[in-house]
Amino acid sequence: MGTALDIKIKRANKVYHCGEVLSGVVVITSKDAVQHQGISLTMEGTVNLQLSAKSVGVFEAFYNSVKPMQVISSIVEMVKPGKLPSGKTEIPFEFPLQVKGNKILYETYHGVFVNIQYTLRCDMRRSLLAKDLTKTCEFIVNSPPQKAKLTSSPVDFTITPETLQNVKERASLPKFLIRGHLNSANCIITQPLTGELVVENSEAAVKSIELQLVRVETCGCAEGYARDATEIQNIQIADGDVCRGLPIPIYMVFPRLFTCPTLETTNFKVEFEVNIVVLLHDDHLITENFPLKLCRM
């Protein structure tokens, strides 16, 4: 075993808020004494924007404004060049999570075209013959709860062949009537999306009913915007030809890290939608889309 470097964050869940102090220890383990040229620790928060393949040619100018945006950055020299004893050495650290100027600590979010990530990186520089050691570790930032009271916005829906859009041959569609409601389109991110759905009647047999959570990421600049919708998760809520008139519960938990409170800034937007997808036996696919607003309370 050579020399091992590790970062241990004090909080087990690694979740912090703006204004708090991020603390922990850097652990260096070695069976021999270690000569080094200094140990530093870097804390960084960045927003990475990417263009989807379909938008790349359209926005040549976009590349200038697509550089990673730094939200927070701080570096400390933990140990000056010297020698560490054999065994285990622990060096404590603290970083206040304070932003400069008008910057905002956005909530951690792992998307496809928008990525908001906060990391700690420890570097141990060594002489020419020994390789430098680096260890990186992610911590999570949650945005502060919103101050305004959340207004519930229930959504009632009725799906029939007449209400569908983007239909090529409406006459060939089987007759059906599906009713239901979402308890609220304004959702608290830590609570599930709930509601119910009833298949009142359908000429064709129902094959499956699914709930699809979609992220809509918009990256842009003055020249224009690239808007891309991608699936986060898909949950089947009914299988087979369901009983007519039977209320089917809608229940979906928002996955951590892959969702965040709805976010709108000058360079990018992160929004969420849910699709109710009904697949009939003759392979007709019926989709109803509902925009959601996620927030943290």
Image (tube, rainbow, N blue to C red):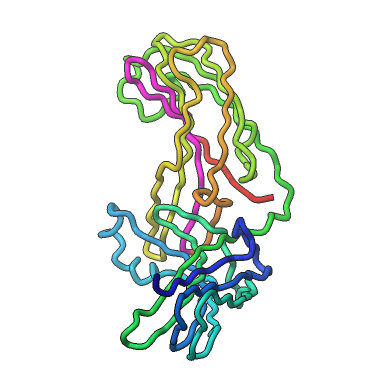
Task: Reply yes or no: does residue 185 show up in magenta.
Answer: no
In-image side of 272 versus 145 (left or right): left
Residue 133 shown left or right of residue 187 in the figure = left
Residue 166's place in the image compared with 232, above or below, is above
Q: Residue furthest left?
A: 57
| Percent coordinates x, y for residue 46 in the rendering | 48, 68
**Residue 235 in the image, given as x and y percentages of width and height:** 47, 31
- Residue 185, quarter of the rendered image: top right
Residue 273 falls inside the magenta stretch: yes
Q: Quadrant of residue 126?
A: bottom left
The residue closer to the viewer here, 163 or 73, is: 73
Q: Is residue 75 above or below residue 120?
A: below
Q: Residue at x 61, y 37 (%)?
A: 192
Tally the numbered discs: 0
Reply above or below: 153 against 258. Answer: above
The quadrant of the rendering that contains the N terminus is: bottom left
Q: Residue 15 at what x, y percent from top left?
A: 61, 59
> Which residue is drawn at the image coordinates 73% and 52% (left, top)?
148
- Magenta part, dominant SS: strand
The answer to which of 147 and 248 lies nearer the viewer is 248
Q: Residue at x 31, y 20 (%)?
A: 169
- On the image, the x and y values in percent for residue 160 come to 47, 19
Q: Which residues are magenta?
A: 267-289
Camera-nearest residue between 256 and 76? 76
